[in-house]
């Protein structure tokens, strides 16, 4: 159900751009107005989300420890899995964000005859996740060449690295293949693994299809003669957008507008969807807090006043019994 | 008990096949043996909890307050603003499914709503409907649903089918902690008077008498004195166990089960013997006669109310610092909550071992250390004479309790003590220990008789790992440092691996500890006779294990 809705939605969005920019020729709307709106929605939406998270206090330090605490000097402290200082937390977060450390731990349970439970290593999700995210990042960075003139050195370097194998003309980027493969894997994993299919919502399929469609239109424009984009025109549009003096040059095909429109949709959709995990992961209290609770007091800004039971009340209730049992008393 | 007639083979015949229908369309089934009874009104009233009433989960009508929905949604809004964890965990899950087969309840039951991700979605779906634009507009397509009485019942069932063990949070790429979500859900349920008795009654008892079992001061004294007498019989040692002694150096706080239940009791004997041998200047407290805190399973407010007594009592007695016994969730509270809730403990001193001089800098703010830290330091500094052969009748393995493992990182200290006290120690398979340890299946207040089937299911992954060790190494004793473990692992073992007993680490310490002037002990702390030494061997030669 979620699959069909999502697929239909992405097809419909493609048709919107096709008809709007192609048939109706609304190039300014699809080339300038929508991208600007999308960018604004992305930036303000993301800020809104992050501010909303950041405004909520962290009342307790609830680190999930995945290694030995720092205690006695002769016991080897696991600095990255149970960080004690800010720098160690930084290290843990780097591992999480750059290498998906927690997902790397993933296992797969199976119930065998006996009964015997066994747990095998399960790294495919980690690998596909990593492949997807890094390809996405490289592709985004590569696109900077359209927006900046002269093209910065690091963008050229990334581009050269991505085309390292020097295969094909134009040279095939590794990430174009990797991102498609990763998306295909993530999609089929969602469909084939019964547990994951059962928990999946339309909101899980939609971004896969949307990003897949963006990647496909991009690939068509780069590698297939029939869809080749006029690179000079694309750059002119991009530079215009960046400089807030937008112009819509001649020579842009409908496929380019579809690509751009889908990217705009992704930008708008981003802050209100699960894709905000990009920001949220930095703020996750089980990972970004040090396990030094007993060493440094954590303050809860709303620490409530509560009714406690005092020793005096306790002794008042049990004084006679305590006296009979010869226990020390505050008041005889 | 409900389903104790089911044989282990039947119970282990778990189907992981998923229903055809969406989980949103699958209503909850309160099957006997898989849920806990509701809180007794009188106890809830004693704690001043809202909407206390006579009520049971199997009733058709839960007699909810008229504006229950408003109360829940308002409570949710309040908590979204007070806990960043809650808001973030509602927003960022991508449903990757990495957590799905990490939950002991899912593994043991096959019920998809026991996958941590779905457990959270039970709450998240309502969050989407009432707190997000996408959910308001697109409804079910966006994974949103209306809060109804059926949804509330589903919450009650599944959020009291999570032991807050945090195993799933180890694997989550965003560190989403289901325990935190369960804690929020339980707080919400509490707002409309939905609690379970096994949480509210101990909490009410603890508030009044200082311990979960409701033992009054003289009863507490009796229990400790009984143990002292028994030690005299077992070892000949004349142990002193001061209670409510002002001016002692250290306040010792243990879970109440240690002095009232078995096999906890042998751990108590171990503590007493150890403190006696090193001449520790310490005191028990009848007022702070409970380290555990069932408030943790109820709400942050009740947790704070119960926890307050520890610092209050430390102050009244004028001790320098606090030492805590073997307990799991107790240490979640002491390590992660106490200082924040009831600190700063500026009237105490940084814990310093009077025997070794070691200063426990890592606890310099909270001023409370774990007995594993204390004892491992004693052993490291050669302050104890240990004869591990006195534990040779045991072939042990160690169950990391959830909270010390995943909320403290207390992993090596207990192992160090075990290795010093036992010659036969084998770890369980690596995916079932340390930070990946499996829950006993009965934590967070779910260890009731009426919930037995679910407990046996939830404890299955742990028991299965113990069985592996039993089959491969001949393991016959499962060590743990948690009072709930000690109460609930014995029936679990009896069901799945009947050859294995359960014990605490300080029981092993107590067995191995060679007292000054002591030559030979006739029995271990359980009263099991040691074999007579063969005459040819040099009697009285103590083998202090070099560690």
Image (spheres, coloured by chain):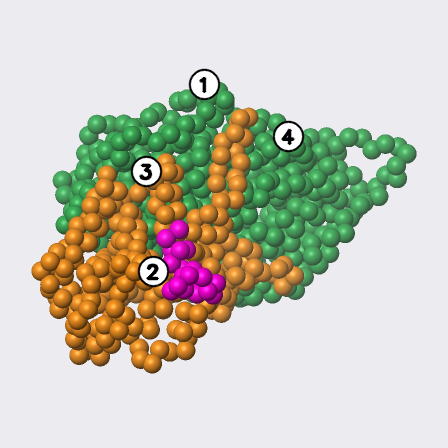
| Label 4 – label 3 distance at C-alpha | 36 Å
Single out the mark in the foreground, 2 or 3. 2
In front of the other: A135 or B489: A135
Which chain is disc 3 placed on? A
Q: Residue at x 32, y 38 (%)?
A: A198
Can residue B421 be seen from the camera position used here?
A: yes
In front of the other: A328 or B64: B64
What is the crowding at mark 4: few (fewer than 14 residues within 10 Å), some, or many (at least 20)?
few
Q: Which residue is drawn at 16% across and 75% down?
A: A247
Coordinates of residue A94 in the picture (x, y in percent):
46, 64
A170 in magenta: yes
| Residues marked 2 and 4, same chain | no
Kindly give the residue lying farthest to the left in the view shown.
A24
Coordinates of residue B159 in the picture (x, y in percent):
33, 40
Q: Residue at x 41, y 36 (%)?
A: B106
**In the structure shown, which secondary structural element does the residue marked by tag 2 occupy?**
helix
| Label 1 – label 2 distance at C-alpha | 67 Å
Coordinates of residue B475 in the picture (x, y in percent):
65, 34
Question: Which residue is under mark 3?
Answer: A198
Can residue A315 be seen from the camera position used here?
A: no
Residue B471, which numbered label?
4
| Label 1 – label 4 distance at C-alpha | 25 Å
A288 in magenta: no
As drawn, the chain in green is B
Single out the mark in the foreground, 2 or 4. 2
Highlighted magenta segment, given as a residue range = A162-181
Coordinates of residue B503 in the picture (x, y in percent):
59, 37
Side of B485 relative to B134 (left or right): right
Question: Which residue is under mark 1?
Answer: B5
């Amino acid at each position: 159900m979620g699959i069909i809705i999502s697929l239909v939605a992405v097809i419909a969005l493609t048709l919107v751009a096709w008809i709007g920019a192609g048939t109706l020729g609304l190039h300014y709307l699809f080339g300038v107005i929508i991208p600007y709106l999308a960018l604004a929605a992305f930036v303000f939406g993301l800020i809104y989300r992050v501010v909303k998270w950041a405004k909520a206090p962290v009342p307790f330090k609830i680190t999930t420890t995945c290694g030995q605490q720092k205690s006695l000097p002769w016991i080897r402290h696991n600095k990255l899995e149970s960080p004690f200082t800010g720098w160690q937390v930084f290290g843990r977060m780097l591992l999480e964000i750059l290498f998906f450390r927690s997902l790397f731990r993933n296992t797969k349970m199976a119930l065998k005859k006996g009964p015997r439970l066994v747990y095998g290593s399960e790294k495919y999700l980690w690998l596909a996740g990593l492949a997807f995210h890094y390809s996405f990042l490289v592709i985004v960075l590569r696109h900077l060449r359209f927006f900046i003139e002269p093209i910065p050195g690091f963008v050229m370097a990334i581009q050269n690295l991505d085309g390292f194998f020097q295969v094909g003309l134009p040279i095939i980027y590794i990430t174009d293949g990797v991102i498609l493969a990763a998306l295909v894997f993530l999609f089929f994993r969602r469909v084939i693994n019964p547990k994951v299919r059962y928990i999946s919502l339309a909101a899980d399929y939609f971004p896969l299809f949307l990003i897949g469609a963006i990647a496909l239109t991009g690939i068509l424009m780069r590698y297939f003669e029939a869809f080749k984009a006029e690179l000079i025109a694309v750059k002119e549009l991009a530079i215009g957008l960046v400089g807030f003096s937008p112009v819509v040059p001649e020579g842009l095909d409908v496929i380019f507008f579809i690509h751009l429109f889908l990217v705009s949709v992704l930008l708008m959709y981003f802050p209100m969807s699960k894709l905000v995990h990009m920001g949220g992961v930095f703020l996750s209290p089980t990972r970004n807090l040090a396990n030094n609770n007993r060493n440094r007091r954590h303050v809860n800004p709303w620490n409530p006043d509560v009714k406690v039971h005092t020793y005096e009340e306790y002794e008042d209730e049990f004084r006679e019994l305590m006296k009979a049992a010869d226990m020390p008393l505050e008041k005889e | 008990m409900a389903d104790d007639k089911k044989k282990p083979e039947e119970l282990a015949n778990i189907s992981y096949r998923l229903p055809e229908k969406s989980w949103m369309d699958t209503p909850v089934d309160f099957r006997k043996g898989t849920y806990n009874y509701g809180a007794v009104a009188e106890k809830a009233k004693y704690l001043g909890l809202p909407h206390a009433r006579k009520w049971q989960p199997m009733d058709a009508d839960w007699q909810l307050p008229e504006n229950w929905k408003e109360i829940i949604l308002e409570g949710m809004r309040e908590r979204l603003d007070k806990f960043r964890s809650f808001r973030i965990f509602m927003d960022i899950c991508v449903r990757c499914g990495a957590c799905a087969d990490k939950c002991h309840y899912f593994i043991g039951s096959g019920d998809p709503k026991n996958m941590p991700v779905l457990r959270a979605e039970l709450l998240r779906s309502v969050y989407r409907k009432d707190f997000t634009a996408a959910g308001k507009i697109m409804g079910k397509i966006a994974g949103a649903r209306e809060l109804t009485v059926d949804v509330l019942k589903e919450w009650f069932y599944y959020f009291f089918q999570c032991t807050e063990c945090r195993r799933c949070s180890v694997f989550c790429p965003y560190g989403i902690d289901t325990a935190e979500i369960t804690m929020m859900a339980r707080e919400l349920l509490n707002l409309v008077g939905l609690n379970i008795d096994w949480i509210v009654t101990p909490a009410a008892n603890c508030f009044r008498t200082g311990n979960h079992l409701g033992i009054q001061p003289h009863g507490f004294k009796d229990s400790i004195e009984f143990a002292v007498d028994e030690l005299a019989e077992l070892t000949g040692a004349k142990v002193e166990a001061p209670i409510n002694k002002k001016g002692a150096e250290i306040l010792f706080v243990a879970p109440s089960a240690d002095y009232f239940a078995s096999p906890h009791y042998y751990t108590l004997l171990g503590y007493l013997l150890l403190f006696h041998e090193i001449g520790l200047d310490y005191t028990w407290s009848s007022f702070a006669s409970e380290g555990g805190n069932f408030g943790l399973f109820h709400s942050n407010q009740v947790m704070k109310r119960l926890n307050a007594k520890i610092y209050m009592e430390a102050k009244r007695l004028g001790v320098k610092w606090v030492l805590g016994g073997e307990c799991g969730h107790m240490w979640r509270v002491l390590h992660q909550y106490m200082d924040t809730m009831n600190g700063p403990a500026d009237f105490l001193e940084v814990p310093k071992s009077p025997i070794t001089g070691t200063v426990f800098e890592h606890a310099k703010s909270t001023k409370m250390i774990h007995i594993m830290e204390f004892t491992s330091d004693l052993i490291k500094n050669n302050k104890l004479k240990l004869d591990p052969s006195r534990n040779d009748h045991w072939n042990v393995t160690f169950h990391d309790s959830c909270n010390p493992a995943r909320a403290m990182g207390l992993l090596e200290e207990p192992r160090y003590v075990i290795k010093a006290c036992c010659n036969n120690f084998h770890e369980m398979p690596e995916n079932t220990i340390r930070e990946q340890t499996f829950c006993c299946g009965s934590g967070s207040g779910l260890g009731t008789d009426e919930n037995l089937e679910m407990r046996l299911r939830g404890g299955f992954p742990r028991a299965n790992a113990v069985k592996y060790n039993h089959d491969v190494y001949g393991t016959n004793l499962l060590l743990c440092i948690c009072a709930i473990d000690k109460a609930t692992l014995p029936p679990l073992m009896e069901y799945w691996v009947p050859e294995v007993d359960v014990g605490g680490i300080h029981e092993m310490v107590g067995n191995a500890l060679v007292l000054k002037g002591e030559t030979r002990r006739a029995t271990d702390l359980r009263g099991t006779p040691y074999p007579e030494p063969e005459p040819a061997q040099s009697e009285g030669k103590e083998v202090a294990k070099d560690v």
